[in-house]
Image (cartoon, grey):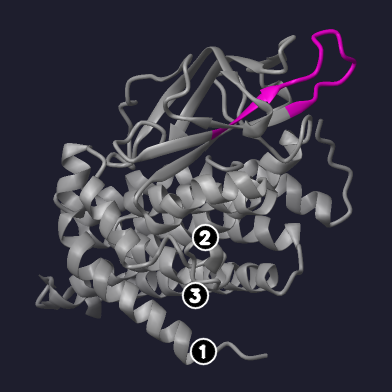
Amino acid sequence: MNFELTPEQIELQESIRAFAQAEIAPKAEELDRVGEFPTDLFRRVGEMGVMSIPFDPQYGGMGLGVFDTVLAIEELARADQSLAVSTMVSIATGLTVQRFGTEEQKRTWLPDIVSGRKICSIAGTEPDAGSDTGGFKTRATQLENGQWSLTGEKAFITNAGTDLSSFTLILAVSSERDAPKKQFTLFLTPNDAPGYTRGAKYRKMGWKSSDTRPLHLDDCQLGEEHIVGGKHGGRWVLHKGYQAARLFLAACSLGLAQASLDLAIGYAKERQAFGGSLGRLQLIQEMIAKMALKVDSARLVTYRAAWQVDAGKEDLMALSMAKLHATETGSEVANLAIQVHGGFGFMDECPASRYLRDNRICTIGDGSSQIQTLLIARECGLDVSFN
């Protein structure tokens, strides 16, 4: 078993790390404080080629793998998880279009996404339903002229309201109201579609510079050419998109966990207490050793899951393990970094404070830790029922 990165992967990793540490990390605290989406910085991410990594060259991509994308997202998140999650949501959404969209949809919408000139989003979650996709209420009704009318509300959606936002993939119930079982269709909804509006930004605990808001659909009329994955095939497609997002979110938590560890080690070496460096105290050493172990194990499960995707091995257990372990590790390691910093760790001037706030949502979004636990149990052969 070879755990070594290829020379090309090392070069990619190092170039993204150098860019992120030089151009993103110094701005992360201000972005957190101001809470505005960093349009120019996102464009720079696009210019660095991050968005293009997993896409087909015919749409402007590099044609590389999911593993390479995970390496890049990890480095972005090591500098600022908020920007990393905006990036990964757009990549995961674009990959859903590349995998399930029509050729016309790909050629029309993907080049701007792949280049980073535009950003996109995917909308499943509603005010009363998240992981329970069967509980979604947003409805798509087919009209006599063949058009579809979408009405409903989506909640907690990332990337839909920026200056660069292009489209949102919106899942809606498309079966008849009296159908014995709901069926769903996924619609590529342009930001300028009549009847489609974005609500005000949420006030959030973390990810403050990432755009998150509700979406409103009031007789938003779309044609057959906007359907992704076929009529009534949307729920399955959405779940495939979520699976990709889970792996990328694991990478976001992994990068943040590494940043927390780096921060704690640096502080332990520099801080003087009880007649010497803080790092010479055994209980501080214990916390840092625990952090290092958790980060390394999270990296192993995340990299393994990414490798399996590129190898064509669709292992749902590996994806759920990566998402569960890496996101929980991100919060645990950030919390320990605060403990190492003592009272200063409680201050917003300390990056560890931002790390803990940012990562908290990672254990909830794209399938909560509890859902991932149930998925793992089901893959172990236990009786776990989902609608």
Q: Which mark is residue 267?
A: none
At mark 1, the secondary structure is loop
Q: Which mark is residue 296?
A: 3
| Residue range highlighted in magenta | 169-184
351, 40: nearer the viewer:
40
Where 132 sits versus 314, above or below? Answer: above
**Crowdedness near tag 1: few (<14), some (14–19) or many (≥20) residues, C-alpha within 10 Å:** few
156, 103: nearer the viewer:
103
**Crowdedness near tag 3: few (<14), some (14–19) or many (≥20) residues, C-alpha within 10 Å:** some
Q: Which mark is residue 6?
A: 1
Name the quadrant containing residue 49. bottom left
Percent position (x, y) of residue 151?
59, 12
**Can residue 107 be found in the magenta stretch?**
no
Percent position (x, y) of residue 66?
57, 67
**Can residue 171 be found in the magenta stretch?**
yes
Residue that carries the numbered disc 2 in the rendered image: 59
**Which tag, 3 or 2, sits closer to the chain's start?**
2
8, 231: nearer the viewer:
231
Percent position (x, y) of residue 350?
18, 54
Considering the image in quadrants, where does the N terminus appear? bottom right
Residue at 29 percent across and 71 percent down: it is 262
- State the CA–CA distance, disc 2 to disc 1: 25 Å
**Which tag, 2 or 1, sits closer to the chain's start?**
1
124, 327: nearer the viewer:
124
Type of amino acid under label 1: Thr
**Which tag, 3 or 1, sits closer to the chain's start?**
1
